[in-house]
Amino acid sequence: MKKLLFAIALIASQRTFAGSTDIWEGPGALFDLQGKETGKYDLVVVNAKNGSQIRSNITVTLPDGSVQRHQCLMTETSHDGWQSKCDNGDGGGHCFGEGLCISYVEDTTGKSYSTTIVMDGSVDMRLLRTELQDGKALRFFREKLHKRQEKGL
């Protein structure tokens, strides 16, 4: 499976307080243009918020046990919007109420990722990401993440 690149972290941290950390985890699946599943992976996103910035460390574990790590730094630009600088490009996103958000990240080679994010309450979210090259879809990623609850709560 080709290197997986992610830029989802700010959405998970919309409900995070300054100076706090959230951990989101769950399964992901990769699909080709015909909608055929071509692979699976597990995802852990650790969001650390400091003021208007959120640093996200993303760990992807593939079925063979190999691990990929990625980072993003998001800066909130409004209550519902942000800019992002990630290891797979720069971009941003916006939320439209009722738990529905989008993000877009593009690198200098013409590769980009457009993501639809659906918050299913305060501790669950689903994501559908389209990987594009020069504006043409290459493949799709589906993820379902759950916010890890602190022990003792």
Image (cartoon, rainbow, N blue to C red):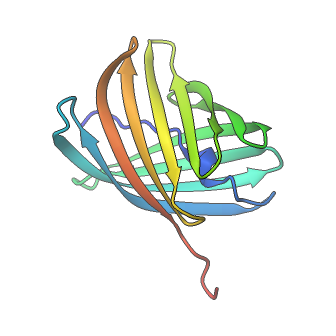
Residue nearest the observer in this picture, 23 or 77: 77
From the viewer's perspective, is 77 left or right of 42? right
Residue nearest the observer in this picture, 115 or 51: 115
Rendered view: 103 above or below 23: above
Q: Where does the C terminus fall, quadrant-wise? A: bottom right
The answer to which quarter of the image holds residue 91 is top right
The answer to which quarter of the image holds residue 79 is top right
Rendered view: 139 above or below 10: above
Q: Where does the N terminus fall, quadrant-wise? A: top left
The residue shown at (64%, 32%) is 84
Rendered view: 90 above or below 128: above
The residue shown at (79%, 37%) is 78
Q: Residue furthest bottom?
A: 152
Image coordinates for residue 149, horizontal then vertical, percent = 57, 75
Q: How many marks?
A: 0
The answer to which quarter of the image holds residue 21 is bottom right
Image coordinates for residue 66, horizontal then vertical, percent = 30, 50
From the viewer's perspective, is 17 left or right of 70? right
The residue shown at (22%, 29%) is 33
Rendered view: 125 above or below 114: below
Image coordinates for residue 93, horizontal then vertical, percent = 62, 33
From the viewer's perspective, is 58 left or right of 73? left
Image coordinates for residue 52, horizontal then vertical, percent = 81, 44
